[in-house]
Amino acid sequence: MTPEATALLLQGGGELGLDLSSHVESFTRLLKLLQQGAAQTNLTALRDERDIVLKHFVDSLTCLRGSWLGGDGRVLDLGTGAGFPALPLAIVQPELRFTPVDATAKKIAFVTRTAAALELSNVTPLTARAETLGRDPAHREGYGRVVTRAVASLPALAELALPLLREGGVLVAQKGPISPEELEAGRLAAAEVGGEVRAVDAFALPVLGEARTLVVVEKTGPTPERYPRREGVPARKPLFWRAT
């Protein structure tokens, strides 16, 4: 990592109230592994060092706003892709245990190799679809936290994530700007599957100033057995949401 990129990482972390100085080596290795992996397979559209540091590393760490990940040690990262936000979070929060999940095997293979190279013993990647996990007794209601990053509409996320949460657990959904219509549909969908929107945190991404939103949904009651619906349906036909 160049001195300029290191400075951006530290500045971004500082704006989030995080001192990342002791983690620079780990993020430097993660950057190199991601660039090497992206040269061989389609892991990420971001190739520039500045973009990776700010739009992958720092952006992932915005999950820590509001301390919503505190408490329960099991965190599922739904739709992790190349390991975001799970890998940066695992570096900074070694006391938490992360399960990065993605349906694309080659991406999970990369996350597995990278976690091993970084000696992140708190990361256990899994190739699966959320709809399948949500009906698997080994995973349904098995997590205290679910994080997602730009995966789907809020109503779809509520249906996919809440079956995986135990009561009292929370979904922390990382999104860009969110429309009132999507937010209202998300509230209705959350109520349908046993949850309630607890926070809508709009903020600017450190350094870049791009608009971001954290939507926090608490699991307040049991999810009806009919949810999640079969594979592909929640994203294709989100509850209460008719995007235009």
Image (cartoon, rainbow, N blue to C red):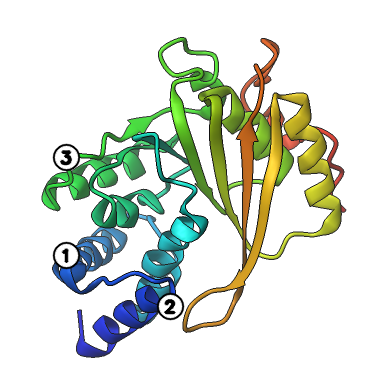
Q: Residue 173: x and y, percent?
A: 58, 49
Secondary structure of the residue carrying tag 2 is: helix
Determine the residue positioned at 35% across, 50% down: 83
* Residue type, mark 3 in image: Ser
Residue 134, above or below 152: above
**Residue located beneath label 1 in the image:** 29
Q: Residue at x 28, y 86 (%)?
A: 7
Q: How busy is the neighbourhood of tag 1: few (under 14 within 10 Å), some, or many (20 plus)?
A: some
Placement of 59 over or under 130, stated as above or below: below
The amino acid pointed to by label 2 is Glu
Q: Mark 1 against mark 2, which lies toward the viewer?
A: 2
| Closer to the camera in the image, 29 or 224 | 224
- In contact (CB < 8 Å): disc 3 and disc 1: no
Query: Is residue 46 placed above or below 91 in the rendered structure?
Result: below
Most foreground residue, 161 or 83: 161
Crowding at mark 2 (Cα within 10 Å: few <14, some 14-19, many 20+): some
Q: Earlier in the sequence, mark 3 or mark 1?
A: 1
The image position of residue 202, as x and y in percent, is 66, 66
Q: Dot 3 corresponds to which residue?
A: 121
Q: Is residue 229 left or right of residue 44?
A: right
For the residue carrying disc 3, how many other residues have a C-alpha within 10 Å: few (<14), some (14-19), or many (20+)? Answer: few
- Which residue occupies the foreground of this view, 240 or 18? 18
Q: Earlier in the sequence, mark 2 or mark 3?
A: 2
How many angstroms separate mark 2 from mark 3 (CA)?
28 Å
Residue 81 in view, yes or no? yes
Q: Quick check: can you spot residue 237?
A: no
For residue 15, which numbered disc appears in the image? Answer: 2
Secondary element at image label 3: loop
Cβ–Cβ under 8 Å for marks 2 and 3? no
